[in-house]
Image (cartoon, helix red, strand yellow):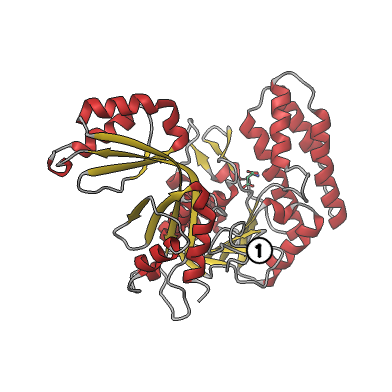
Amino acid sequence: MIVAKFGGSSLADAAQFVKVKDIVRANNERKYIVPSAPGKRGAGDDKITDLLYACFDAANNGKSFRHVLERIQARYVEIAEELGIEMDFSPEFAAIEQALKNGASREYAASRGEYLNGKLLAKYLDFPFVDAAEVIRFTRDGRLMEEETNALIASRLKGLPRAVIPGFYGAEEDGTVRTFSRGGSDVSGALVARAVNADIYENWTDVTGFRMADPRIVPDAQYIATITYRELRELSYMGATVLHEEAVFPVRKAGIPTNIRNTNDPKHPGTMIRANAGQDETMHTITGIAGHKGFSIVSVEKDMMNAELGFGRRVLQAFEEYGVSFEHLPTGIDTMCVVVHEKELKPHQEEVIRRICELVNPDQVTVHDHLALIATVGRGMVRNFGTAARLFTAISSQGISIRTIDQGSSELNIIVGVDEDDFENAVKAIYDTFVRI
Ligand code: ASP
């Protein structure tokens, strides 16, 4: 059985709805459908969710929001009309208008995009509609109650062989609507998949899956056929985003694979994300490359540092005291390097350095800015000898110097730091070496 989540661009207009219905119909196993709100129909268009936030902001400032709400209503009406669905949205919109006038929350406002789209899609597919407010439970301070939610979805869907459950929101015990962060329908879909113990969680979007490198840098970067959740985590931490970060945990825990698919190219198998994946002969040594700019390295040098008990802890304490979190710690015998986000460090740089001096009395502290980190990730790296050497040769043969290296002991990931100006060329060099062979 399959749980299929469709993103906003997959449901942006009537033509997209038709594609979604075809996809749902094409496989009888697609039983539970989780839609987002209608997204942009093209450049310059607005997402329904953004318009709803705009309504809330206007209402909150005592301004009129009627014209925006009318635009939203017009979009739903247009989709319904073009699909030949008879649905009267007026009472729904009157209720939303009234609620906003009575001080309804920002999260309630945003949630109506998915709520109405869920109703519309349910009618179009002829599936029952299950309000997410009934089954996705949040605490009073807006945190997901994962186990309660799991039980609620499981029991509510037990007697329903098919259903549409809108994404992005749920509610507190007393019915107060809460939402996830932006893009959160991915999380809703994952929660439904876990609760019904789906065989696959399909995530339908407007890209054909993950690419081995950012296509803005490597335009013809290949699609990744299979990736593990761990590899994905490493890549998304470094900036490769297709899925909401929190959408991984429920399905990963339950051992359910997530399949990223393209609504506009449904024949393409997309990217399959699995808990464990074997290594086949056709696979490249690496699974993907990701990275981003905007890091600084703070190097703390002191002779015999390695013999000093608590040295590392005290250095990190200096960062902690100023709320700067560290990303990596490539450390040598007499040097400890702390890699941090430049933006986080800058406002506190002087104080942090002063504090390091007080706490560990170093020989020298230097800061190197404008660093880019590049993660090369791959479960195939363990099996292949000399991966690190190939990687470093690829980068240095372009005349790029490597500022820092960090290899996790899992042998799943090698991170290198280069100057920001060298970032794109370094990514290309790694891609060429491992993929274009
Ligand atoms: N509609 C919401 C957003 O735009 C949630 C989602 O699409 O997943 O963020």
| Nearer to the camera, 89 or 432 | 432
Q: Residue furthest top?
A: 62
User: Which of the two residues, 416 or 264, is positioned nearer the viewer here?
Assistant: 416
Give the number of marks. 1
* Residue 155 visible in the snapshot: no
Query: 333 or 328, which lies in front?
Result: 333
Q: Residue furthest bottom?
A: 281
The residue that appears at 14% across and 42% down in the rendered structure is 304
> Dot 1 corresponds to which residue?
262
Residue at 47% of width from left, 56% of height from top? Answer: 235
Is residue 262 in view? yes
The structure residue drawn at horizontal position 51% and vertical position 35%, both measured from the top left corner, is 173
Q: Is residue 287 left or right of residue 259?
A: left
Task: Describe residue 302's horizontal placement relative to residue 8 as left or right.
Answer: left
Quarter of image, ligand 1? top right
- Disc 1 residue type? Asn
Circle 1: is it few (<14), some (14-19), or many (20+) Cα within 10 Å? many
Q: Quadrant of the N terminus?
A: bottom right
Is disc 1 placed on a helix, strand or loop?
A: strand
Position in image of residue 233 (x %, y %): 44, 55
Quadrant location of residue 376?
Answer: bottom left
Question: Quick check: is the Cβ at mark 1 less than 8 Å away from ligand 1?
Answer: no
Report x, y in % for residue 130.
Answer: 63, 49
Nearest the viewer among 50 and 221 is 221
Q: Position of residue 187 (x, y in %)?
A: 54, 49
Can you tell which quarter of the image residue 275 is in? bottom left
* In the rendered image, the vertical position of residue 16 relative to residue 183, given as above or below: below
Residue 223 in picture, x, y percent from top left: 57, 68
- The residue lying at 59 percent from left, 58 percent from top is 217
